[in-house]
Image: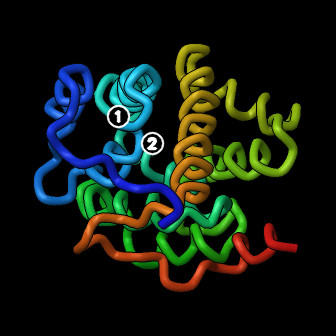
Amino acid sequence: MRFPLAMPPYDEKVQQTMDKVDLGPLSPQNFLRVLAHQPRLMGNVVALGGSLMYKGALSERQREIAIFRVAVRTRCDYEWAMHRALFAERCAITDEQLQALQNEPPTHPCWTAQEQLLIAAVDELHERSTITESTWASMGAQWSPPQLLEIIILIGHYHLVAFFMNATGTGPEEGAMHLAVFGALAKEDRT
């Protein structure tokens, strides 16, 4: 770990933020305890994440598929492990689909057409910092303008989280299932 976890007692603003994020034994405490060193930004980052997680315009399953693909593309063990532990089963994302997110193109047959577009959007934003015209046109036929904007913000936010966790060297909470070997897609990004 490159950055220390903040230890209690926390200042009042940090404690209030910590109290708002409670997902049980696998709450993202390591993420919060590193962010706690910068209370001004901590509240903003947590507020945006909470808005995307709990008040989003996408289905929970769509959100998690995008987050898993971001985790693979950014090689973020923290994101993968925490979301697998907290949301994979709840969102009916199968082991086959988790494998496909690691190793297969967006067109893999285990996904619906809409899910394929979502995965393509993650890949294109990761690779090009934009979405191609053809993918955007197809997405426009599937989602409303507010949903389209949320897809972009969701992917961008989880890139931010991945960059933050990777750069600080912060690992997942104990009990989360690590992404032991990153699939072919993440390996491509290393070259």
89 vs 148: above or below: below
Q: Which residue is mark 2?
A: 63
Q: Answer yes or no: do the residues labelled 1 and 2 have beta carbons within 8 Å?
A: yes
Query: Can residue 66 be seen in the rendering of this structure?
Result: no
Residue 65 at x, y = what percent? Answer: 49, 53
- The structure's colour scheme is rainbow
Q: Is residue 164 left or right of residue 50?
A: right
Question: Badge 2: how crowded within 10 Å, few (<14), some, or many (20+)?
Answer: many
Residue 53 bears which disc, if any? 1
In percent of the image, x 56 and y 47: which residue is there? Answer: 164
In percent of the image, x 29 and y 70: which residue is there? Answer: 176
**Occupied quadrant, residue 108:** bottom right
Q: Is residue 94 left or right of residue 162?
A: left
Q: Is residue 164 left or right of residue 42?
A: right
Residue 101 at x, y = what percent? Answer: 57, 67
In percent of the image, x 40 and y 37: which residue is there? Answer: 37
SS of the residue under disc 1: helix
SS of the residue under disc 2: helix
Residue 4 bears which disc, if any? none
53 vs 64: above or below: above
Q: Nearer the viewer, mark 1 or mark 2?
A: 1
Q: Amino acid at mark 2?
A: Arg
56 vs 73: above or below: above
Question: Badge 1: how crowded within 10 Å, few (<14), some, or many (20+)?
Answer: some
Q: Amino acid at mark 1?
A: Met
Q: Is residue 163 left or right of residue 63?
A: right
Indicate which disc, 1 or 2, sits on the residue closer to the N terminus: 1
